[in-house]
Amino acid sequence: MFDNASRRSFLAAPLALQVISTPSQAAPAIKTKVLGKTGLKVTTVGFGTMITSDASVIERAADMGVTYFDTARGYQSGNCERMVGAALKSRRKQLVLSTKSNKEDKEAALQELETSLKELQTDYVDIWYIHAKSKAEQITEGRLEAQRIAKQKGMIRFSGVSTHAGFEEVIPAAIKSGAIDVILSSYNFTMGATIDPLLADAKKAGLGIVAMKVMAGGFRRVKPGDPNYAKFKQEGVFPAMLRWSMRNPNIDTTIPSITDHDQLDENFACMDKGFSPGDATLLAVQRDFITPLYCRACGKCSGVCPKGLPIPDMMRYVMYAEGYGQFGMAREQFQMLPAEVREVSCKDCSTCAVRCPNHVNVMARMSRAQELLA
Ligand code: SF4
Ligand code: SF4
């Protein structure tokens, strides 16, 4: 299944790696796959930079041998691309780098790509994604034309589309377009039956497949600082989630969010170990834990709140804060909501008018968002 497996010595890694790892540990094997018909060779664990604020983690990942890094023009108000560009500039040619644009207008998208290239300090990106689409009609001719022009000009090598929700429409539409080279889709242990046949179709059509949101919201039963945290980490529920995604032969690579060196080590080691029955047990427990918390961004509650609350957006903000530990980002985005929305309190409703098909406790989560972020 894998076309490469090699071992690297920790002695060759930077000092930080040696401090975190014991010298007697063998380095985990690095595994790579080819990203569909693009021919790009990528490590099966890549690096999602959306919430990374420490450039040294990105640099060290590249030193360790991770070859795929993903960002977007919109991440961290544009600062993410700048950080990624500075961190990876010296080894750009050895890496696969992707970014994304949300612009619908062809000229605006191309202009945004120019900004991305400048911030990333590179002449081209390997994959340029149409960002976060949930409906087939959002893969517009204008967006595809921008990708075609960018390819002709050598600004991008391959085109892609990313989808958080609505993959049922977006993946078939991407295949049908004949113009998309790579699909970047949410894919985690809470999904499976519906999406797996679509991923198989995409693979058969020669598309590369990248999995994101592999940590299903990142919710931890025990937080850092809790006396039981070390024990919880040993259980390895997060590596189990990553391995669940990697076990699907149609997934070429994964881009877990990585914010610190511990997470980098934990994820990196997943290239070396397959999904086990023990992992399945951990995930069953985690599934019970996250069910009332984890919004799958299906959008089915959009426009349902009689008081006009944008539930999917607020769910995302509270997940940034509590799942990924990114309180600053969560509050910044919450504070951009209109004042009349920020002033609503779900505690004033005796019952919530919204029923989530994925069993999220909407009233409790919205109240938590207001408590933390208002
Ligand atoms: S709260 Fe439920 S219905 Fe609303 S977007 Fe999330 S998963 Fe979908
Ligand atoms: S409790 Fe439900 S119905 Fe009431 S404001 Fe909150 S989201 Fe809307």
Image (tube, helix red, strand yellow):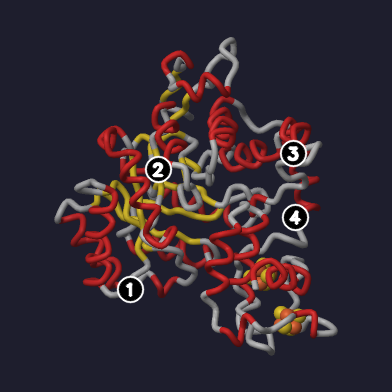
> Does mark 4's beta carbon lie closer than 8 Å to ligand 1?
no
Q: Around disc 4, counting alpha carbons within 10 Å, would you say few (fewer than 14), some (14 to 19), or many (20 or more)?
A: many
Residue 307 shows in this picture: yes
| Quarter of the rendering containing residue 223 | top right
Between the residue at mark 1 and the residue at mark 2, the CA separation in whole angstroms equals 24 Å
Query: N-terminal of the two: label 1 or label 2?
Result: 2
Residue where numbered disc 1 is placed:
104
Residue where numbered disc 3 is placed:
280
Residue lying at 43% horizontally and 36% vertically, measured from the top left: 56
**Disc number lying in front (4 or 3):** 4
Residue where numbered disc 2 is placed:
69
- What kind of residue is marked 2? Phe
- What kind of residue is marked 4? Ile
**Disc number lying in front (3 or 1):** 1
Between the residue at mark 1 and the residue at mark 4, the CA separation in whole angstroms equals 35 Å
Q: Around disc 2, counting alpha carbons within 10 Å, would you say few (fewer than 14), some (14 to 19), or many (20 or more)?
A: many
